[in-house]
Amino acid sequence: MSEVLSQKEIDALLQALSSGDVDVQEIKEVENSAKVKKYDFRNPQKLLKIN
């Protein structure tokens, strides 16, 4: 997420959050699921860097 948002886009996101159009819990679940990756230390494999 290296994209910079304009003030208009930020305002639209904040409006969607306050009106209930966007579910905050769903955003957190998606964010958390992308950070953790299971790794089997008993059968180690080379880790790949993903951009």
Image: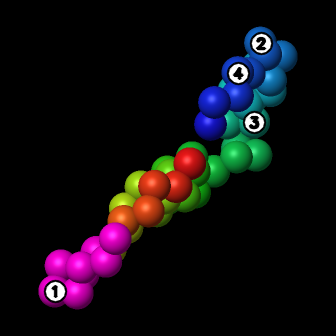
Dot 2 amino acid type? Gln
Reading the image, the residue beneath label 3 is: 16
Mark 1 crowdedness (10 Å alpha carbons): few <14, some 14-19, many ≥20: few
> Residue at 80% across / 23% down in the picture?
9
Between residue 48 and residue 25, name the one nearer to us: 48
The stretch in magenta equals 39-46
Q: Could you tell me residue 27's position as x and y percent?
A: 57, 50
- Magenta region, main secondary structure: loop
**Which quadrant would residue 32 be assigned to in this image?**
bottom left
Residue at the outermost bottom position: 43
Is residue 29 part of the magenta span, yes or no? no
Between residue 35 and residue 51, name the one nearer to us: 51
- CB under 8 Å between discs 3 and 1: no
Dot 3 amino acid type? Ala
On residue 4, the disc is 4
Q: Is residue 19 above or below residue 33?
A: above
Q: Could you tell me residue 12's position as x and y percent?
A: 80, 27
Dot placed on the residue nearer the N-terminal end, 3 or 1:
3
Q: Nearer the viewer, mark 3 or mark 1?
A: 1
Q: Nearer the viewer, mark 2 or mark 3?
A: 2
Mark 2 crowdedness (10 Å alpha carbons): few <14, some 14-19, many ≥20: few
Q: Is residue 1 left or right of residue 5?
A: left
Residue at the outermost top position: 7
> Residue at 74% across / 21% down in the picture?
5
Reading the image, the residue beneath label 2 is: 7
Q: Is residue 43 left or right of residue 46?
A: left
Reading the image, the residue beneath label 1 is: 42
> Residue at 45% across / 55% down in the picture?
49
Q: Is residue 46 left or right of residue 9?
A: left
